[in-house]
Amino acid sequence: MKKIDTDDPREKLTKARMQLLMAFPFFGELVMRMVFHESKTAGVGTTCVDHKGNMWYHPDWIKKMTSTQEVMFELAHEVLHLVQRCTVRFPNGGNHQVWNIAADIKVDSILVDAGMTQSKVSKKNITDELMEKYKGKTTEQIYYHLIQNPEDQKAFGDCPHKDGKGGEGPDVKPGSQVGDRGCTSGALHGAKIDSETVEKWKQHVIAAAINAKNRGKCPGFADDFLADIRRPSVTWKEYLRRQATSMFRGRYSYHRDNRRSRAFGMKLPSRTRSPNGAIIMIDTSGSISDDNLSQFVSECSGILRETGCQFLKIYFHDVECYHVEEYDLNTIKKIKATRGGTSHVDVFEKVEESRDKVGMVIAFTDLETSFPPIPPEFPVLWAHPPGYEGHSVPFGTKVKVDLTL
């Protein structure tokens, strides 16, 4: 392990950045784009990064590092928060400290898989056992598991929800440290997230992945990331609008004669009668925040009304359907959910029993649920938050709902 021949924090960072560029070009190229800021404020006990690529560091923290590899790991760790869009993906109403723990577990796992050596303090908190436990899981999945299993938070010092009492709101300010490590990756120093900067960093990541790939040093996760973002994508709103327009404005068919066929002397298609309304199933099991539920319903309502949907009913459920309400934009301002387990068996039965002329069902869920044994006759759109792409459904269509876009 190469020793650093200087005590100057900024010089340590500069030297480690050059070493990172040579040994791990993907991370190194991105770190070259970061701007270093020294900070001795209480909110920065170690290092942290915002979505713009600003990295704050406490000089005493950097001085403690005695090897180049440790500083390299620190830099790669911070820039990977940018690559993973940890700030942008933070759940509305979530807990900053627990989110940081989840993000750190995911980030360190990726770096170790890429061949980097954990720093001493990182290995103290994020052990091999912890990384193995959450292997293959997304940051969101790790976060919600930590909320429900607070014993995994013990290694990080005094974190909220050790008693297992949920994570309804931000108990700590953005920028708070978690134990000895815990970088913030949040809205530190009041930085507001803007889509232009997020897109710019996305392009930086693409360029870094391509350059590293050309050198034969592209880490596996970056290769997958590159393939994913090159894949043509349609936002969930565009997909819903397209499906709803086709459903509620009716389709043209030759099964019935158009009344104007005789006048034109040719067979013309007629528009089939469309169903009346739509159902939104809201999974209130606990892994989706109230703010996200409200935003999702409001945006769905606007799209459905544009496309001719005549009524919209919301079915609230966990294991069982416990409330049904016809949606009114003027009366539902805030959805307050009851939290419990998850199943879609009972709620689909309730829809069938209603005898409503349903055109489509939109189920907002994390997909960690039980499904009905028999598919319904109406089309089902499974709308899930980011991080649950690996879950399969027995029928219907999955679409990722990113409320930050």
Image: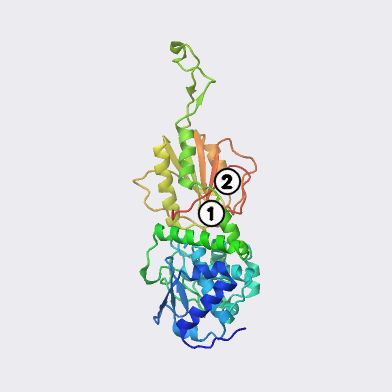
Q: Within 10 Å of the Cα at label 2, are there few (<14), some (14-19), or many (20+) other Cα atoms?
A: some
Percent x, y for residue 127?
A: 62, 75
Mark earlier in primary sequence (1, 2): 1
Residue occupying image coordinates x 46% and y 55%: 337
- Residue highlighted by disc 2: 346
Q: Within 10 Å of the Cα at label 1, are there few (<14), some (14-19), or many (20+) other Cα atoms?
A: few
Percent x, y for residue 12?
A: 50, 82
Left or right of residue 299: residue 288: right
Q: Amino acid at mark 2?
A: Asp
Can residue 399 be seen by looking at this rendering? yes
Say which of 30 and 311 sits in front: 30
The quarter of the picture where residue 387 lies is: bottom right
Q: Residue furthest front?
A: 215
Left or right of residue 54: residue 15: right
Marks 1 and 2 in Cβ contact (< 8 Å) = no
- Residue highlighted by disc 1: 229
* Image mark for residue 49: none
Residue occupying image coordinates x 53% and y 21%: 254
Left or right of residue 40: residue 61: right
Percent x, y for residue 116?
A: 61, 73
Q: Amino acid at mark 1?
A: Ile
As measured in the structure, the alpha-carbon distance from the residue carrying label 1 to the one carrying label 2 is 37 Å
